[in-house]
Structures are given as structure tokens and as C-alpha cells.
Amino acid sequence: MFNKILVIATSALLFSLVACSDDNPSGGSVPPVTDESSSSVTGTSSDDVGGSAANISSSSETANSSSSAKVPKNTAACLWNASKGDYLVNTGFDPDSLRYAGLWYNFSDDPAGGVTEIHMPDVCVYEGPEYDCIVALLEFCGSYCAEFRFRKGLSNEIFAGMGFEVAGFDNPYVSNPIRLYGDISDWGGICVTYAADRDVLLKLYTDSVTFYKTDLVKSNEFVEKCITWDALNATEASKHASSIRFVMPGSDNTNGHLSIAAIGKYDANGTCEVDGYAEVLTKGNGNLEGLFVLRSSSSGQTIVSSSSSASGDCEVPQTVSGLWNRLSNPGSNDRVMTGLDNGTETSGYWFSFGDDMSGVGSVKWPQSLGIEYTTGDEIYDYCMGVCGELEFAKEGYLGIGFHVAGVVDPSEGDSPVAKANISEWGGLCVTYASDADLEVVLAYAQESGFGKFSRMPKMTLPKSVKLKTVCADWNKFMTVFSEVSTTFMTSILFAVQGDANTKSRFNIRGLGKYSEKTNFCEYDDDPFVSGKMGLVIK
């Protein structure tokens, strides 16, 4: 897959077509010779539109079949399946991947004076090549996904969407490339697997202004819908196709979310096997709230955790707290005993951070940690762990963490952080309490600051005002890559994403390497009350 990317991504056109940044909206990134705002509609029929349910969906969409038994899909007709690692829609007109055929791009009402914004997850590799961005996006979403922030400008219509060229451009590297056309009449139509929180228009373009359309009804699950060219009144038009687009109309000051997971030729029984389910992201995940992503049903979303209904003898959390244990043995250790110190004796000491110290807020401890590598015994004894309160001045991340191997040279004021291999741990067990969802982030940045959390492997511990023990192996840590690499990690962070002018308390009482133990004992004490003084952290 990466070799293919290197071939087609040798010019800046890739990023004029695809914007992968949550921080910087792409307001109408359109191929140069396209005019989405045109109203020259040749055919609008949506009669006789067949549909089939994707494996991932419990939708009532069903294939056109006379039998109630499940009919196998015609997977040979599947042209693009994001969950299989496909990068381009295999239209058949660009075998060398030189003309940008099948490359996904965004568009909006911008050319007609609109101001709608397009936002996508910021999952680009930290300091990596820009052409990796779309790869990271497809792997993170399991689809091509985007959020549309509809705003009324000078355009008569408010809309945004995504699409791909059928045959591409004669020379995509020049400023005004010549569009190519393809005969896709032999497809018979098109199958699309999608999820959307608004109705979407599927449009087949035969040039920059003429299109044939039908409706795709909104769905909170990924569903596959199959439409014939005849249903679009486009049997002849499909012999001269330029692009296929998915347009979401909007209204002022509203948002919409669209994710497309697969594209195939027409087959009444469907074409693309997409195994998984739709997860709607929440703000606590550090991503775009409301975005649809495809999660594999085999990846296992259930994490081993304590349960109030557990039966039999329970496991005390101390048995899975070999790295950091203040649960019942205050003074046992004043830092996380990683066993991977680089010889500087600077590993495992707790520190606080504030979203690269960009004024997000501050971490309030029961008392000051002091200078450099203070033991913080009073704090740890007070909390029977490491505890504090996060005060957010504006939206962003705050939290605490520790370096796995320490810093390279403690005598330097801003020394790089040393790397370490933590794969042998197998995962992590955490005994904690938190007012908000707590993200455990595996950081690999050596310099000061940790960059974007969405670029790093992480998992989310659900909020709990009672002490809770959770064990998760490395496979539970989501990443923009196909696999989590724990070979060159520098720090482990515990982060909370908060809104402006809010507060959130936390306490981490135990840390350990991964264990398959499940039935952990529960504690009745308030984790936000000190072990010594009985004072509540407010």
C-alpha cells in the first residue's frame, strides 16, 4: 500500500484534494475543473433503488432476493474497501496510479461563495511525510470520514461532500489538468457502504456541470446500498463518466458527518464484505464529536475490568500493581519502577503537562511537587497514590505522566527523553478514579511537548468516582497505524480532555504490567479523600 502512495503523491495536488486536519479546515478542496454548485440536473429518478445490509449493520436495508436466506455477496465486484487497506477506488482506468483516478477528495460550497468548513481527524504521523495522512485517516476511521460545519455565505446552497474521479486527469501535476472520462456502463450501477447523520445525494457526473442523482437515506449504522444506472436514468451517461460524488446538503450553523467504507459495482446482493460496527466518536475520545468510524467486530472492545457483580474470590488490585503501588503500602516507592531506567535515575517520576503548555490550564496538586525530581512523598501518602485536580482555562488536554527510561542528560535543562522498549509488559493494569474519561497515551516524542494526542497509541479508561482496576493489552490501544509498536516509547501519559472553565479530579493508585485477571476487589473509601488528613480535593 505504501509503495502505491509513493507513486501518486509526488506533487502538492494530493493535499489540494484531501485535507486531514482537525485544526485547519479544508473549505472546498476541489479538483480544478469541477463545479459542484451547478444545478444542471439531467436525471433525478430514485425509483427501483435496491439495497443490501452490510455485515456490520442491523439496518432493515435488504438485498433484492426472493429467498429469506442470506445470499453471499459478489465480492469480485468490490472496487474499494477501506477496512481491507485499500487506498484508491479501483476504477480500472488508472492501473499505474499516475492520474489520480479513484483518489478521494473533499469539496464544499466554497467556489460559489460559501463558507462551509470540512474537518477531518488529525491523525497524520508526527513529523512524518504528508502523503501518509490519507493512509492514517483510512486506518483510523476504517472509512473515508469527515465532519461538515455548514455556514451560510454568498452561495445559494449550503453543502459539502466527498468523491473521486473515474479516470483522473491527463496530467494532474499542472495547474489546469485535462479531465479524462471513462465508460463504466459495464458496472451496471454502484454499491456504496456508508454511514451519515443527514441524507446524502449520490451524483454521477458526466462533465463539470451535468449529473444524475439519487438519495441515500441517513443511517447511524454502516449500510450498503446498491443502485442501477437505469434507476438514475444514466444508462447512456455512464459511458462518459467523469466523477462520482456524495453530497450532503446542510443548513446554517449545523454540522453533518459522513463516512464511506466501501464502493463496488452493482449487484443486487451487494459486493463488499465489511465486518464491524459503527462507533460514533465522543469529545472524550479526543476526536471530532459525532464522527462515524468503523470498528472491527474482531478487535474486541471489551476491556478486562472490575465488576460489582463479580462472583467468587476477588483479586486485590495490589497483585497487578508491580510498577506503582500506593494502595496499602505508603512509602513503598516514590516513583514508577519501570525497570528500564537508562542509568540516570530519572525514570518513573511523575510530572504534569498542559497540552504542550499552551495555556489550556493547570494541574493542582495537594501541595507543590518542588523542583526537579522531588520524591513527593507527602502527596503520595496523602493521596495513597498520585492525585490532583485539573483546572481548564480553555478546551484542551491536561494530565500527568512519567518517563519510562528517564531523560538522556539530567544536567541539561531541556534534555531529550530516552526511548525504551515496553513490549515485554504486554499491556497495562491501572487502578484509578477520575471524574472524567481518562486517556492512557503511549508517547514517543523525545523533545519537549507531546504533539497531538490523536497521533499516538491510546486507550480510554471510563470515568469512575469509585476506585476501578482495568487491565488492557497493547492491542486495546488504538492508533493511526495498523499495529501498535511499543518498541520506542518515551513516556506514559494520563490525559483528560476538558472544556473551558471546568475542573476534573483524578487519583492513580496502582500500575502494573498486563494481567489476565478479571475479578478485582472493590474499595469503599472515597478516592478523592486523603489517606492522612481526611481533606477532600476541591
Image (cartoon, helix red, strand yellow):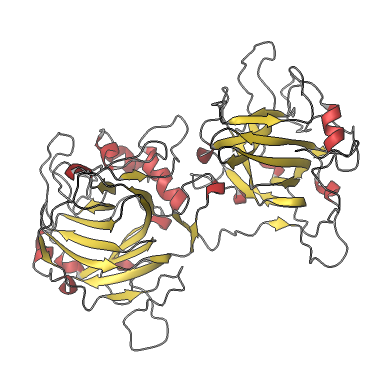
| 322 horizontally vs 89: left or right | right
Q: Position of residue 514 (x, y in %)?
A: 73, 48
Residue at 89 percent of width and 34 percent of height = 332
Task: Name the residue rendered at 69%, 24% in the picture.
Answer: 406
Image position of 393 (left or right of 422):
left
Residue 196 can be seen in this image:
yes
Q: Which quadrant of the figure contains the C terminus?
A: top right
Q: Position of residue 35 (x, y in %)?
A: 15, 48
Count the labels in the image: 0
Residue 214 rendering spot, x and y as whole percentages: 22, 67
Residues 336 and 339: in front is: 336
Can residue 295 be seen in the rendering of this structure?
no
Q: Identify the residue at horizontal 68%, vertical 31% (top origin).
A: 363
Residue occupying the far top of the picture:
411
Residue 4 percent across, percent down from the top left: 32, 43
Residue 368 figure quarter: top right
Left or right: 337 as drawn, with respect to 504: right
Q: Residue shown at 24%/45% (left/top)?
A: 97
Q: Specify the quadrant of the image occupied by residue 213.
A: bottom left
Nearest to the observer: residue 48 or residue 94: 48
In the image, residue 447 sits, relative to residue 220, either above or below, namely above
In the picture shown, does residue 339 fall above or below 311?
above
Q: Is residue 115 above or below residue 246?
A: above
Which quadrant of the figure has residue 453? top right
